[in-house]
Image (cartoon, grey):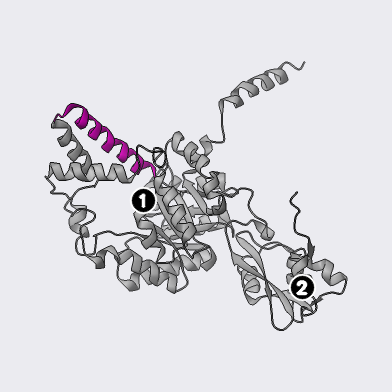
Amino acid sequence: MKFRETSCTISALVRTGQLSVAEGTETELYERICDTELPLKDFMDLSAYMKYVGVTDEFRKVIKTFRVPEKETPAGFRKELIYGEDGCVRVNLVRDIAFEKNGKRRPTNMLFSANTANPFEVETMKYFIANLTTNPAIIYEQFLNNPKANKNNQFKDRYEVLEELGRLVGAGVDISVEFDDPFAPEEKLKEEVARFEEILTSYRLVVKVPHTGPLNPGNVEDFLKGKYPAVEEGTSKDFFYGHNLAYRLQEKGYKVNFTLMGEPHQTALALLAKPYFINAFVEKRHDQTSGLASHIDNLDKTGDAVYRKMLHDYMMKSDMLSSDDTDLAGAEEKARRLVRYRNYYSKEGYDGLDSVRHSLRVLKQANLPDTRLIVCNTKSDQMYYDIDKLSVEPEFADMKQRIVLTCEPGYFGRFTSSPTIYTYQRSFLNSVSGRG
């Protein structure tokens, strides 16, 4: 039988005289920590030394930033105990979206994230998410410039949107915000991130930095006109542009969401930038793999060269080749290599989640205990079913609360329902209508 470790509350230790409230600890702050539990064994081991209890300066700063009700600590923070050389045990607050208010863990280990900038959508799910992720397309195309979403042009710019989102979700939800142009001059980026931080606070702000591949300020215009090299052809300076931007932001104390990760081979190098979030884009990648495999299978079965041309055209549309690529044989070789790499015909990748599995394994081995994996780009019912099952696979049991699933609230809403609801509600409501 497994027994729960014995603990005692700070207030019990103060009432019995085993601890005294440290001088300078305000009464209203003490009331926010008095129900905090200390492992009894730890306290007994240190009881001859620890005489006082108080809070850290960081604790004070968090409470001042988020004015939560009396006797509470805000959601999005875990309590940690710091044993000082001065004989005082202090309660600290550490940012951690796996926690609700008063330092209690969220009910489930897998965390959910809303992939939207629409405050009207966020309202429906705000109590159930730990993260909110946006990007320029989500903010501008899907909301600000969409009359159906931004009703009566209520919000004028992204800063107004961020203010409302922050108000809605409160302290416990991180909000990822991406630069309008990651290639903008450094001073422009500094101004943007400073404004983000002013609105969201350093606790909630996560700066979203994209992988940039071979793109740079000099070739972006050509890229948008449809002229570009193969995605793996470029200079090291360009390939590591996003990494260096993420690294510099992290060094300045910002949390970074390092995004646009379509392949698991990006994970290890991304982690070197010490990001707060990494990503696995899954469904579009899986659809593309299925398309590649279908054309290859038809080519192998028939030997008809038309399928080689169809394969090449499909890869062009999927951005897998350069804009001027005409090498059918080279495209076929690349396609076969991709299908093998993605484990399409094995249990590892038949569901399109090989990138998630591999990234979790790399993350498990990394020295970044607070970094989480965001699983994104999900659209179908089957993908949700498979992610839900993966999250409880025994191999990933020790990765609890390090998986974040993000999508639009409407997508998640589908999985709150089932046909059983109709079956039983029909019976219940008919019974009520005939109650006499």
**Relative to 339, residue 42 above or below:** below
Q: Residue furthest right?
A: 16
Quarter in which the C terminus is drawn: top right
The kind of residue on which mark 2 rests is: Asp
In the image, residue 284 lies in the stretch drawn in magenta: yes
Q: Residue at x 53, y 36 (%)?
A: 415
Q: Which mark is residue 160?
A: none
Q: Secondary structure at mark 1?
A: helix
Q: Specify the quadrant of the image occupied by residue 148.
A: top left
**Which mark is in front, 2 or 1?**
2
**Residue found 70% across the figure and 74% down from its top:** 90
Contact check, label 2 and label 1, Cβ < 8 Å: no
Residue 95 x/y as whole percent: 58, 64
Q: Nearer the viewer, residue 307 or 341?
A: 341
Position in image of residue 339 (x %, y %):
29, 42
Q: Is residue 225 visible?
A: yes
- In this rendering, position of residue 192 left or right of residue 25: left
- Three-letter code, disc 1: Ala
Q: Is residue 125 left or right of residue 104?
A: left
Q: Which residue is mark 1?
A: 137
Spatial distance from mark 2 to mark 1, Cα to Cα? 55 Å
**Residue 179 horizontal/vertical position (percent):** 37, 62
Please provide the residue range marked out in magenta. Answer: 282-304
In terms of secondary structure, what is the magenta stretch mainly? Answer: helix
Q: Which mark is residue 45?
A: 2
Q: Position of residue 200 (x, y in %)?
A: 51, 63
Which SS class for mark 2? helix
Q: Residues within 10 Å of mark 2 (few under 14, many from 20)?
A: few
Residue 134 appears in view: no
Of label 2 and label 1, which has the lower sequence position?
2
State left or right for residue 266 relative to residue 302: right
